[in-house]
Amino acid sequence: MSKHLFALGAVGWLLAAPALAGEQPAAVSAIKDLNGQVVGTATFRQQPEGVLVNIQVQGLQPGKHAMHIHAVGKCEPPAFKSAGPHLGDAKMAPTSGTPHSHGAKGATALSMNHAHSAGSMASSIPHNHGAMHAAMAGDLPDLVVGSDGSGKAEILNAEVRLTPGRNFLLQSEGTALLIHDVADPNQRIACGVISKAPNSSPEAKVNP
């Protein structure tokens, strides 16, 4: 599937997101690469246990990609630095000697699917950027991309929410989903602003 066709399909998927959400607050994200091309989509649905995140990507380098939710809803090239730090970073004290274990705080990968391991299960998959940090609310398990450049993930993050409060994904500053390079996890290669899904539950309104 070409990136152009994938982008057209992604728009339809995002428009259908509110219907999937039902009465629960919902959010969506169109994930774009450094050239501004849509390479993925994500939907976010409030559940009693946290926020259920469904991610689908196409055209990425095969391998394990670090992935996080960042604290600013801006995806400006050339390096997506505009998205700021990880969500929850400012409220977390550094823990000396503790690896940055993504997924350990409250995000669990319910499924990871790609061309060669459809239906494989993963739970709290950690990855390490080579630095020492405490786990944060925006930390997510690695996104596994298959040899065809595609990948899917379903993740439950108990540390974020789509209703006003701590780690609110629709805060006034916004939030963004970031995907990192396989070889250099410090390099941000794809970014998607997280926004309220059209016609979503009124509880998901952005703070004034």
Image (cartoon, rainbow, N blue to C red):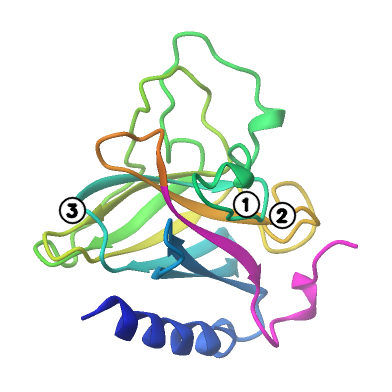
SS under mark 3? loop
Q: Earlier in the sequence, mark 2 or mark 1?
A: 1
Q: Position of residue 87 (x, y in %)?
A: 62, 42
Q: Does the residue at mark 2 contact the one at mark 1 (Cβ under 8 Å)?
A: yes
The verdict on residue 195 being magenta is yes
Q: Which residue is mark 3?
A: 62
What amino acid is found at the position of numbered circle 3 in the picture?
Pro
Q: Which residue is mark 1?
A: 160
Q: Which residues are magenta?
A: 189-208
In the image as oriented, which residue stretches furthest toward the top?
96
- Picture quarter with the N terminus: bottom left
Relative side of 66 to 85, left or right = left
Mark pair 2, 1: CA separation: 6 Å
Name which residue lies at 30% across and 76% down. 3
- Picture quarter with the C terminus: bottom right
Q: Position of residue 131 (x, y in %)?
A: 42, 19
* Camera-side mark, 1 or 3: 3
Q: Which residue is mark 2?
A: 168
What amino acid is found at the position of numbered circle 2 in the picture?
Phe
What is the number of callouts on the image? 3
What amino acid is found at the position of numbered circle 1 in the picture?
Val
The verdict on residue 137 being magenta is no
Name which residue lies at 41% across and 20% down. 99
Task: Say few, some or many: other residues with alpha carbon within 10 Å of mark 1 (under 14 / 14 to 19 / 20 or more).
Answer: many
